[in-house]
Amino acid sequence: MEGSIQTLRYLAEEILEDMTLDEKIGMIHGGELFKNKGVPRLGIPPLVMSDGPCGVRADFHPDEWINVGNTDDYVTYIPCNSAIAATWDRALARSAGNVLGQEARGRGKDVMLAPGINLKRTPLCGRNFEYFSEDPFLTAQLASEYVKGVQAWDVSACLKHFALNHQETNRLLVDEDIDDDVLEDLYLQVFKDVIDEADPYSIMTAYNKIHGEFCSESKFLLNETLREKWGYQGFVVSDWGAVHGTKEAAEAAIDCEMSVTNDFDEYKLANPLKKMVEDGEIDESLIDEKVIRILILMLRLNMIGEDRLERKDASYNTFSSKAEVLDIARGSVILLKNDDNILPVTRPAIKDKKVLIIGENANRIHSNSGGSAEIKALYEVSPLMGLKSRVGGGTKFDYIRGYCSKPDSNAVDNGTNWQELSLENGGGKQQDGTDADKELKEFRAKLRDEALNACGDYDYVIFVGGLNHDIDSEGVDRRDIELPYEQNELIEALLEKRPDTIVALIGGGCINMSRWIDKCKALLFMYYNGMEGGSALAEVIVGDVNPSGRLPETFYYSEKDCSGVSVGDFGDENMVHYRERFHIGYRYTCRENIKVQFPFGYGLSYSDFEVSNTSYNSGMREVKLTLKNNSDFDATEVIQVYRLPDEMADYLQLVGFEKIYLKANSSIEAIVPVKDKFGIGNYAVGKNVLELVKIV
Ligand code: BGC
């Protein structure tokens, strides 16, 4: 419903007048695993929530973490948020939100629990694939577009996890020790920027504590900052199981308690709250405020009120959604190395040739795991399928597994869902160190030999490996950034025998490749790239698409190169110290001159670009430049503008970027708007944080 929040508030207050205490309480806690109770007597439907962010999650039974198991909840699989960030393309981020909002509406959901916008403070966080970037500007810019896309469908986006949810280890208990200015100007500012730009109707609180207070009960975070200081009037929902105290949550400006257990009436904001109101310990007006905010949300979504017949309808699994996710996937593939122009392997070159594809990730799907981001994808094109189907019958393809992962260490095979147990043992852990027992090692050696024995017989060898959601997953942090499953041994040996092997890695974050990177000539990386990820990778390999993805995070050699955040910081004391202050990611490595494998913003293309005539117009706050494509391919370049360190901010920071499309052998005058909260500064322009030219 259109109208100012104030008008909606009057309407909500009128509706509230007719509600009993029980009905109000039914609105502010889960009555099912993903719904509140609504008020059927007054025609108020339950508020239906669902996970994202990679698509609308499968339907669960109301009170059990068991999939309903119908065929109607297969959906479009959208590239994960890191993959969206790798496009550096606002229009594609909007498109991702558009697909999610449309499908959510099609599936009858009201609030999509996405996007996750926590910054990638450490490469070890198991949920990094759900987050956009280590950089606050890139995150806020793309997340804002995503939110606008979702909400165009009368569906609410839900920013999560507010705030500082940067690790899975002990996520239910961990306390964040952080300086106030860093908390406010870096980590909270990202949320504020998205709120100011895109008006997300919902926010989810994080599990962890900040300064000793649980986020879901924090007066500082919710009452003083979010509501009073920022004036946020949207809906605040707890993470599932993040509320601990009835009084604390009643007094905090959180609106609805959700959890993973099915004793709904015993939730803190259910019977225990009712009793405290009846005993006069809690004022009913606190409940009224929460209900009013939920009703305002429902009015905004046209779920109730006189405009409810106007609520948008939508379809899911449409052909246009598939085309949209393919476009995002294409824009997200990152070319990291291309010595001797090994890539692309053009269609005429590959025709009638023999191609060997090696690696488990060539033949594996990722959509069905990873924690709450898992979905039932309508389909998922693997790289093997993508290559074969793209190139056609003239080429002979063979596949050899080459390595194998280990059986999923997170799986619980007693019929329970991981989420049901997710409130146990601090809510998360770090991966154990053991990769394989003797038997598995022998099996891997056999797979490796098979690949090595065969690789000499082919015209082309393509290896597809990397990580999977046993590693990039909710509830588990990575132990280190090493390539698992003895892939290093395999790649090293492969490159020895076949120096022309094309290596493609898939994962949710950075991977140490130092054992073989100097010997590898052609290297591609993509994040979990949606249902058309395999098609996009194939299109890049054969040159139908000129790669244009750029790293939205630093690729370190070791996790120890990252602001001192390493395994030890996830220690037993349940306290994380943000000693690095503002210096996360590239801000730190650039300042300390730490050598990295690939810097933030990095990515190659099949074309050469030339940037010239850069100038900064301080009145318009924009950088102007000439960009030239010196190649015979149409191409897309990402121009990045950074603010140089000075006494106002002693770190490099991204303040502008544009993704620019250029025809072969053409040039363009481009403008990159700069958003610098300091107003003045010195700027540099370039293709990544290490290749910058100061604008004079
Ligand atoms: C996750 C949230 C998710 C919720 C509902 C929690 O475990 O932290 O991100 O939205 O579950 O599935």
Image (tube, rainbow, N blue to C red):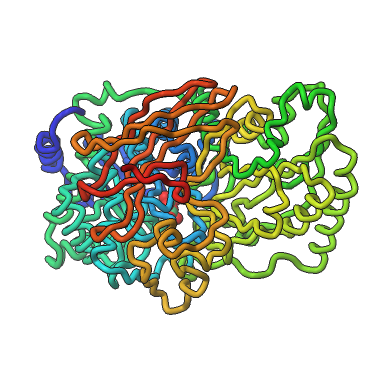
Residue 536, placed above or below residue 640: above
Can see residue 52?
yes
Residue 125, placed above or below residue 364: below
Q: Quadrant of the N terminus?
A: top left
Residue 372, placed above or below residue 357: below
- Give the side of residue 250 with respect to residue 35, left or right: left
- Give the side of residue 17 with respect to residue 343, left or right: left
Q: Residue 579 appears at what percent x and percent y?
A: 36, 71
Q: Residue furthest bottom?
A: 573
Q: Residue 69 appears at what percent x and percent y?
A: 57, 39
- Give the side of residue 249 with respect to residue 540, left or right: left
Return the residue nearer the eye: 90 or 472. 90
Residue 154 quadrant: top left
Q: Residue at x 71, y 48 (%)?
A: 520
Q: Quadrant of the C terminus?
A: top left
Q: Residue at x 71, y 55 (%)?
A: 516
Residue 352, placed above or below residue 461: above
